[in-house]
């Protein structure tokens, strides 16, 4: 079975980090195992770290790494890469909520040894019947069309741990 390390990168995400961790804990996994969930908090000044610590106490797979100084997402990713032990590594922004089978869909393709990387795309939860919801949905559809030409996988991507 493929085991997965999930890296979540947060800066002042107290409004979303709990929902994100709940969604990750509820993932439906059939062919992969979620070995560890590593949250890198980059000098957060809100309650992000406290919320993650609460989850960490209840779930031994959750680990919090705190960057005392904010050094950017690439620095946070490098900390995750040093700590991760899974066969497949998934990176996720802390301002997202994955669908219930996202980790499975990102990691299962790695049973094919020719696969080196997979990615997902954000799906807005806004109501497209409202003006703002329509605008947000349209923006993400355009973002996806552009990413099909020139990929941008910053929200969620997976790759082999080599």
Image (cartoon, helix red, strand yellow):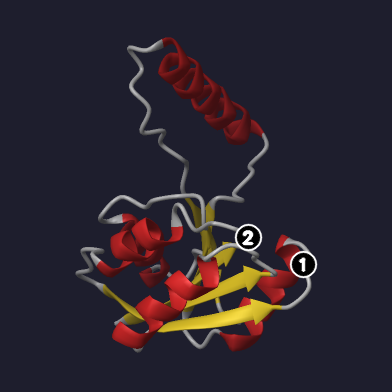
The residue at 24%/72% (across/down) is: 31
Q: Position of residue 73 (x, y in %)?
A: 71, 62
Seen from the viewer's position, the closer of residues 135 and 105 is: 135
Q: CA distance from mark 1 to mark 2?
A: 8 Å
Q: Position of residue 32 (x, y in %)?
A: 29, 74
Seen from the viewer's position, the closer of residues 36 and 18 is: 18
Q: Is residue 3 visible?
A: no
The residue at 59%/49% (across/down) is: 153
Secondary structure under the numbered disc 1 in the rendered image: loop
Please indicate whether residue 131 sits to the left or right of residue 76 in the image: left
Please indicate whether residue 85 sits to the left or right of residue 71 in the image: left
Return the disc, 1 or 2, that comes first in the chain's sequence: 2
Q: Are marks 1 and 2 in contact (CB under 8 Å)?
A: yes
Q: Is residue 11 visible?
A: yes
Residue occupied by mark 2: 11
The residue at 39%/58% (across/down) is: 20
Seen from the viewer's position, the closer of residues 139 and 72 is: 72
Q: Position of residue 43 (x, y in %)?
A: 70, 69
Residue occupied by mark 1: 70
């Amino acid at each position: 079975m493929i085991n997965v390390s999930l890296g979540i990168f947060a800066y002042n995400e107290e409004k979303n980090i709990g929902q994100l961790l709940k969604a990750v804990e509820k993932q439906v996994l059939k062919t992969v195992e979620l070995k560890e969930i590593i949250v890198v908090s980059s000098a957060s000044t809100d309650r992000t770290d406290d919320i993650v610590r609460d989850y960490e106490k209840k779930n031994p797979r959750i680990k919090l790494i705190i960057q005392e100084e904010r050094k950017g997402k690439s620095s946070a990713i490098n900390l995750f890469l040093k700590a991760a032990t899974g066969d497949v590594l998934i990176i996720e922004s802390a301002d997202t909520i994955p669908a219930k089978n996202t980790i499975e869909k990102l990691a299962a393709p790695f049973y094919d040894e020719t696969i080196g990387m997979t990615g997902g795309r954000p799906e807005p939860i806004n109501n497209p019947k409202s003006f703002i919801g329509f605008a947000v949905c349209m923006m993400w559809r355009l973002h996806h069309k552009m990413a099909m030409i020139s990929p941008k996988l910053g929200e969620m991507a997976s790759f082999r741990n080599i």
